[in-house]
Image: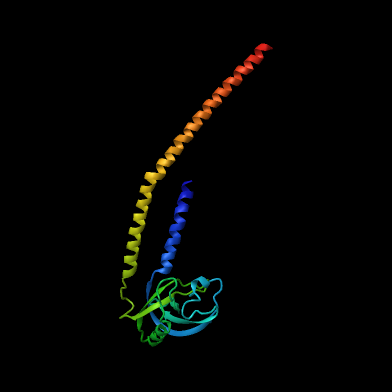
Amino acid sequence: MRYVKWTVTAIPLILLLAFLNYTLPSHDIVRITDTYAKRVTPGANAWFWAKPASGNANSATRDVFFIQTIRPNGKPMVYRNEDTGWGWPPYFKFNTSNLQTQAADLKSTADNPRWVVITRYGWRSDLLSIYPNAVAIKPVDGPDVTIIPWFNIVFLTVLAILLFWLWRKYRRFKEDRIDPMLDDMGEAWDSVEDQASDIGSRASGLWQRLKDMLAGRR
């Protein structure tokens, strides 16, 4: 039962962490190599693309902007550039075309690199054919610039305080309401068991006396 309890507790926690990891903004320092548009028809992975009500996502098949980049370690990273509109996640992004123009203007080569920090959300997976969505682009002095995720720090701190407050409220409610009710139910059950045991003992004695009487008559 201990493993079942830990599993039941761990699954919601893992889902929450995955949700936050996907949704909260991340910052990547990269060098932009190219920008392009590609016609895309989301299939089973449609959840990872913009919804039909968002900006340039008015149909199942649509043109999507992409930004090709190289990380400081030389590995490639590709971003999609889609509006989020008023949908989820709540970035309220409506400037897809402007962002694509800015990205194209910041292209550079390995010989003369121009480093930028791309704010994005989402994951990159070759297997699932999904891309993180670029939200903002800002030039930086070099690949070693330190980016402090202030929004994430504040948000996670507030979330931790809220979850702790909810946990305290639950613990107090459990101690005041649920535990006494369970204790009363346990006492009631014990009383029922005692009564059943007493009735069983009486029935057993009565049956034994009846057997003795029948045996005496013989």
When the figure is inspected, residue 202 is found, relative to residue 95, above or below; the finding is: above
* Residue 82 in picture, x, y percent from top left: 45, 79
Q: Residue at x 62, y 18 (%)?
A: 210
* Residue 54 in picture, x, y percent from top left: 47, 77
Q: Check the picture and name the quadrant holding the C terminus.
A: top right
Is 118 or 197 nearer to us in this picture? 197
When the figure is inspected, residue 192 is found, relative to residue 202, above or below; the finding is: below
Q: Residue at x 52, y 81 (%)?
A: 62
Q: Residue at x 60, y 17 (%)?
A: 209
Q: Can residue 13 be seen in this view?
A: yes
Instruction: Give the farthest residue toward the right.
Output: 218
Q: In which quarter of the image is residue 76?
A: bottom left
* Residue 126 in picture, x, y percent from top left: 51, 73
Q: Which residue is drawn at 55% across and 80% down?
A: 61
* Residue 113 in picture, x, y percent from top left: 36, 84
When the figure is inspected, residue 167 is found, relative to residue 29, above or below; the finding is: above
Q: In this view, does 50 lie to the left or right of 71?
A: right
Report the number of numbered marks.
0
Q: Quadrant of residue 135?
A: bottom left
Is 94 or 20 nearer to us in this picture? 94
Q: Is residue 107 visible?
A: no
